[in-house]
Image: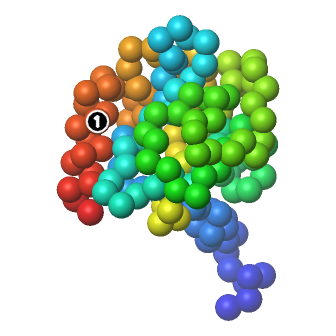
Amino acid sequence: MPLARIPLPLAFLLLAAIACVPTRPSPVQLGIRWTEDEASLEIRYGLCEGERIESVEVVAPRGFVINDGNDRVIWRITSSGSTVTSIRVGSPPSGFRETVPFTPGSIQMAERLAVIVDTSQTQASVIFEGQDVERERILTDEGPIEPASFEARARETCLDD
C-alpha cells in the first residue's frame, strides 16, 4: 500500500515505530544520580556477564521523538569495550575517549537523556531533568530507587536473559 493511502493516524504510528530504538528490557539497569559532592552527575549501569560498554552520551532532546538522531549531544565518550559501571559525567574513565567534550552547566534544569550502548549494540537510556536527580538515590525510568535496589534489579535482569 503506498504511503499516501495509509490513514493519517496509522502513518503516525508507523513513523513512531520506525523511530524507536530497541532498548534493554529493564530500565533499572541504567540510572543517574548526583555525585557525593553534587558537583557532577554519575551514570550507573548494570552490566551482565560478557557485556562491555562501547559508548556513553548525554543528549538534549529536540522535537517529539527522543533519541531519534536529531538530539544535541552534550557529552559523549567511547570505548572498545569497558566493564566500568559508574561514570562521572565530564570525566571519562580509563579506557574511554571523549569524542564530545562536556560543557559545565549544560545539564542543570532542562530535560536530558543519558544513553549507553554496549558491545551487543543494546541501548539503554533514561530521561532526566537536573532538579529531579538526587544524591542518595538513583533515578531510573521507574523513578528514584536506593542503590542496593538498583544493583539487585540489575542482577535479576541478568538472570532473566
| Residue 18 found in image quarter | bottom right
In the displayed structure, 12 sits above or below 100; it is: below
x, y percent for residue 144: 39, 25
Q: Is residue 41 left or right of residue 74?
A: left
| Residue 45 found in image quarter | top left
Q: Residue furthest front?
A: 94
Residue 36 visible in the current orientation: yes
Q: How many marks?
A: 1
Q: Residue at image x 22%, y 59%?
A: 160
Name the kind of residue labelled 1 in the image. Answer: Glu
Q: Residue at image x 63%, y 35%?
A: 92
Report the colour scheme: rainbow
Residue 59 visible in the current orientation: no
Seen from the viewer's position, the closer of residues 16 and 44 is 44
Residue holding disc 1: 151
x, y percent for residue 53: 51, 52
The quarter of the picture where the C terminus appears is bottom left
In the displayed structure, 158 sits above or below 42; it is: below
Seen from the viewer's position, the closer of residues 6 and 48 is 48
Characterize the local packing of mark 1: few (<14), some (14-19) or many (20 or more) Cα atoms within 10 angstroms: some
- Secondary-structure class at tag 1: helix
In the displayed structure, 142 sits above or below 46; it is: above
Q: Residue furthest bottom?
A: 1
Q: Is residue 85 left or right of residue 156?
A: right
x, y percent for residue 8: 69, 69
Q: Residue at image x 56%, y 28%?
A: 88
x, y percent for residue 138: 41, 26
Seen from the viewer's position, the closer of residues 144 and 98 is 98
In the displayed structure, 85 sits above or below 143; it is: below
The quarter of the picture where the N terminus appears is bottom right
